[in-house]
Amino acid sequence: MLDDYLDQVEDGNGGLGSVSIFRGGREVYQRRFGQKYLSGVRADADTLYQIASVTKMVTAILAFKLIEQGRLGLDDTLADFHPEMPAAAEISVRQMLAHSSGLGNFAIKDSTVWIVDALEPPAILAEIRRQGVAFVPGTRVAYSNSAYYLLRMILEDTYGRPYHEIVEQEIARPLQLAHFASVKANHADTFRSYAFADGTWGEIKEVDFSNVVGVGDIASTPGDLNRLIVALFNGELVRKETLALMAPAPGKGWGMGVAEFAYGENTFLGHGGDVIGAHSRVIYNVQDGTAIAYSTNGERIPTNAFLETIVGIVYGGTFQAPALK
């Protein structure tokens, strides 16, 4: 059934992407589609996709590894590391992880995505300071790219290494993720992003991923995304009690680095990522150990609708012909 659906997507030139499904800790399904329509692009099952904000789940895992070691505390404040930031003395690491700090979205400046060209860190930090906080820290939840940018800086200060080396040494190497890297690791075999217009796919200008290190810069295959999330829920990265802290309360949406996704009668935990031209999701069902990862570098079916269909098929449902945008 999955092949039938993805055949329809591919035959209709309905998108570019890859799906991976794990059960019992191993991959039981993998399918790439659409890349044959890209002229002059060489790719295979090992070519990476930009996973955008799924990076934040990795940043959270790395923070909780430090917390387990006693090198960082959930109640440590931003002022302990960057006192020049707005409301630094009132913002805790816990709030930064949980999107309740009140900090904003540095990627949007004057209603424009301004991170498409390389920026120096002082310019980004100045924008974070200029935006300030939108509410008293800890009183609301609002997704914050700025909080995770500062968390990445805290990680680098505490680990004593740049983010790409931390990811490699603490995540990729222990889990044997051969196709999983932060942007400054300079992994060459990564898809560019495309948009569909006038019957063809054209490459589009992406953000400069060096501007979003620790926020949205990692590239991976869906298979390695599933290996990551299976390892997380199997206790290979953090302790079970730590994972319980990361996960949201049922129905609350956001936890600390992990979000809730409901599809029909099934509830998953994981993370999503969306950036100009690229979208990813990796989700895990704690009830039956099913992990599903999807990445696209050219979207004509909205990512959430696509994943809802995939989940439905995995759990025995049928599907309708895909509606393309």
Image: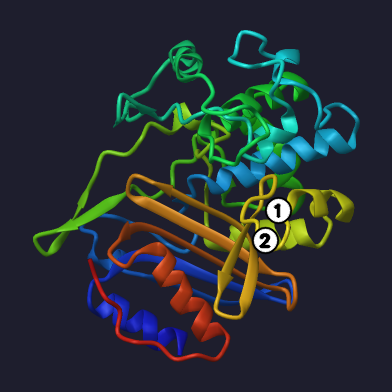
Residue at the spot x=61%, y=80% of the render? 265
Q: Secondary structure at mark 1?
A: loop
Query: Residue most toward the left?
Result: 198
Occupied quadrant, residue 78 = top right
Pointer 1 local density, CA inside 10 Å: few below 14, some 14–19, many at least 20: few
Q: Amino acid at mark 2?
A: Arg
Determine contact: label 2, label 1, CB under 8 Å. yes
Q: Nearer the viewer, residue 253 or 272?
A: 253
Residue 228 horizontal/vertical position (percent) = 68, 56
Pointer 2 local density, CA inside 10 Å: few below 14, some 14–19, many at least 20: many
Q: Tell me how far mark 2 sits from mark 1, CA to CA.
A: 9 Å
Q: Secondary structure at mark 2?
A: helix
The residue carrying mark 1 is: 176
Q: How is the image coloured?
A: rainbow
- Tell me the number on the disc at residue 227: 2
Residue 63 horizontal/vertical position (percent) = 75, 35
Q: Nearer the viewer, residue 228 or 102?
A: 102
Specify which label sits upstream in the sequence, 2 or 1. Answer: 1
- Tell me the number on the disc at residue 30: none
Relative side of 295 to 64, left or right: left
Relative to residue 100, is residue 223 depicted above or below? Answer: below
